Amino acid sequence: MRTFRRALYREPPVANVLAVRPSGSTTLIDAAVQMREYDIGDVLITEQDWVLGVFTDRDIVVRVLAADKDPARNTAREIASGRLVTWLPMTR
């Protein structure tokens, strides 16, 4: 049986990553359509090689719909979580 600890140190699966630029005008609707198209639950907000934030399908529900905001007028960057904590993968 694989333990949680072993799962943390395994190689990450190869996957498509969807990223948008913060200065762009990617609306929440545009981001949601792309999330549906790629069957993913989150989008990275990037500038050059830096990840500035992450926007999730839960953000759409909690920070937009439940807050009575207009998804056509708000951008992914406005709703995204910032100040991310990241780390480099461990080497063996």
Image (spheres, rainbow, N blue to C red):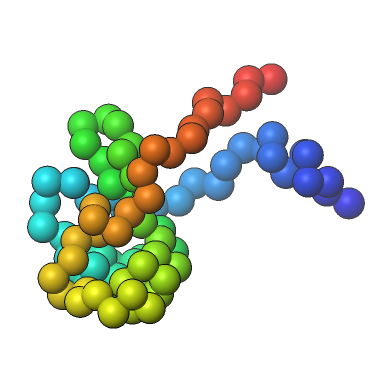
Q: What residue lies at 28% left-to-right and 47% top-to-bottom?
A: 45
The residue lying toward the viewer, choosing from 44 and 63, is 63
Look at the image and tell me in which quarter the C terminus lies.
top right
Q: What residue lies at 36% left-to-right and 67% top-to-bottom?
A: 63
Q: Residue furthest front?
A: 67
Q: Left or right of 11: which side holds 76? A: left
The residue lying toward the viewer, choosing from 14 and 67, is 67
In this picture, is 78 found above or below 91? below
Q: Left or right of 16: which side holds 86? A: right
Q: Is residue 89 visible?
A: yes
Q: What residue lies at 62% left-to-right and 37% top-to-bottom?
A: 11
Q: Left or right of 88: which side holds 73? A: left
Percent of width and height locating residue 85: 48, 35
Q: Quadrant of residue 31?
A: bottom left
Percent of width and height locating residue 18: 32, 53
How many numbered tags mark residues here? 0
